[in-house]
Image: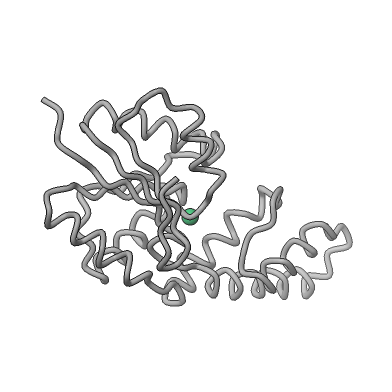
Amino acid sequence: MKKLSAIVSDFDDTIFFNKKALIHAAKDLYDNLIKSKDTSQDYKLLSDLEITMEEGKVAKGFNKKWKTDLYTLAYVKYCEELYPNKPLINYLNECVKQGSELIILSARGEEFRKETEELLNAYNLNYKLVILPKNHELKDEEWKLLEIKKLSDKYNHLSLFEDKEENIRYILNNLDINNIECYLVNHSFITKM
Ligand SMILES: [Mg+2]
């Protein structure tokens, strides 16, 4: 029998803001690259790191080889710089009290399960399950779509919370179910899409 309803929430920049952690991580990588005096320096990588240092976000097409290093620094070394979206956390916990199950759906990767669950526990999020990809073969939105399809078989109703509008659009355009509501999260502002 299907369960009643689930709240499915993204992690980074939805429940926890990672801007400061990414800025620190990018600075570390940038400094190391400059110090290494590598003659084959990748100038696109350096200018992408400058974007992250200034804006706290990862540039599109960021070098795959260095992506893991950047995220590992941000999510492990600088995990204390991630700060919580408290209004959303309170709202999600309230939904759990009302009977929904909370599922965290994050493209971070299985390699960051420990750090991810530690943060969720530190802020008393009453989650049922954390779903992370085992590899990064699919684009984030493609992987999320597949996982949401699986969840829609298990639950009568899903509410998705996500900070990336393009991910929500991709999911809504490719999902042939009507038991889902999607919400765009921008700090404490939540907009139904
Ligand atoms: Mg996000």
Task: Classify 104 as above or below 81.
Answer: above
Q: Quadrant of residue 82?
A: bottom left
Q: Work out which residue is located at the far front of the displayed protein and give it.
A: 192
Which residue lies at the image location 32% right of the left edge and 28% below the top edge? 150
Task: Classify 54 as above or below 58.
Answer: below
Which residue lies at the image location 38% right of the left edge and 69% below the top edge? 85
Report whether 95 appears left or right of 130: left
Coloring applied to the structure? one colour
Give whichever of 39, 69 is nearer the camera: 69
Residue 158 pos. (x, y %): 28, 39
Residue 116 pos. (x, y %): 36, 59
Give whichever of 71, 15 is nearer the camera: 15
Q: For the N terminus, which image quadrant? A: top left
Give whichever of 114, 152 is nearer the camera: 152
Residue 92 pos. (x, y %): 25, 59
Report whether 68 appears left or right of 37: left
Residue 73 pos. (x, y %): 54, 67
Q: Quadrant of residue 58?
A: bottom right
Q: For the C terminus, which image quadrant? A: top left
Which residue lies at the image location 46% right of the left edge and 47% below the top edge? 107
Task: Classify 105 as above or below 94.
Answer: above
Task: Classify 125 as above or below 193.
Answer: below
- Across the whole image, how many numbered discs are drawn on residues? 0
